[in-house]
Amino acid sequence: TADNLGNQRTWRGKADFDATVTSLGAMVEHADAHGVRRIGMPQIGAGLGGLSWSDIKRTLEQLGAKSQVDLIVFERFAAGVEPLTFDS
């Protein structure tokens, strides 16, 4: 399963924090409703999107605490290193 999160007004613009939070919340609700237990993602909105990773990370921690879905962030590829996980 793949989700495409809308967090920019146009493909040329920067990510919008409120849109990112709304999209992440909807993704987690959808996953909960359909029995998805793990979601892996990059640092959504924090790269080219220009958002603060610490703000997005805090949002993911809050969403993970209220859900049965494990949110896994792939911050960087490093062989043999465990990804950062926000457990339910």
Image (cartoon, grey):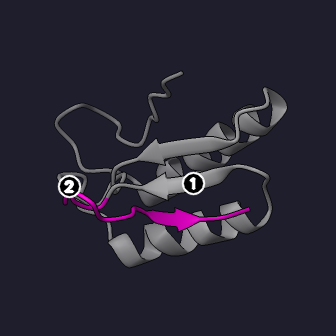
Closest to the camera, between mark 2 and mark 1, is: 2
Residue 53 in which image quadrant: bottom left
Is disc 2 placed on a helix, strand or loop? loop
Disc ID at residue 85: none
Which residue in the structure is indicated by mark 1? 71
- Disc 2 versus disc 1: distance between alpha carbons? 17 Å
Q: Front-most of 71 and 54?
A: 71
Measured along the vertical axis of the image, is residue 23 above or below residue 67? above
Magenta span: predominant SS is loop
In this view, which residue lies farthest toward the top? 1
Which residue in the structure is indicated by mark 2? 77
Residue 38 horizontal side relative to residue 5, left or right: right
The percent coordinates of residue 56 (x first, y second) are 45, 66
- Tell me which amino acid carries mark 1: Leu
Residue 55 in which image quadrant: bottom left
Measured along the vertical axis of the image, is residue 66 above or below residue 5? below
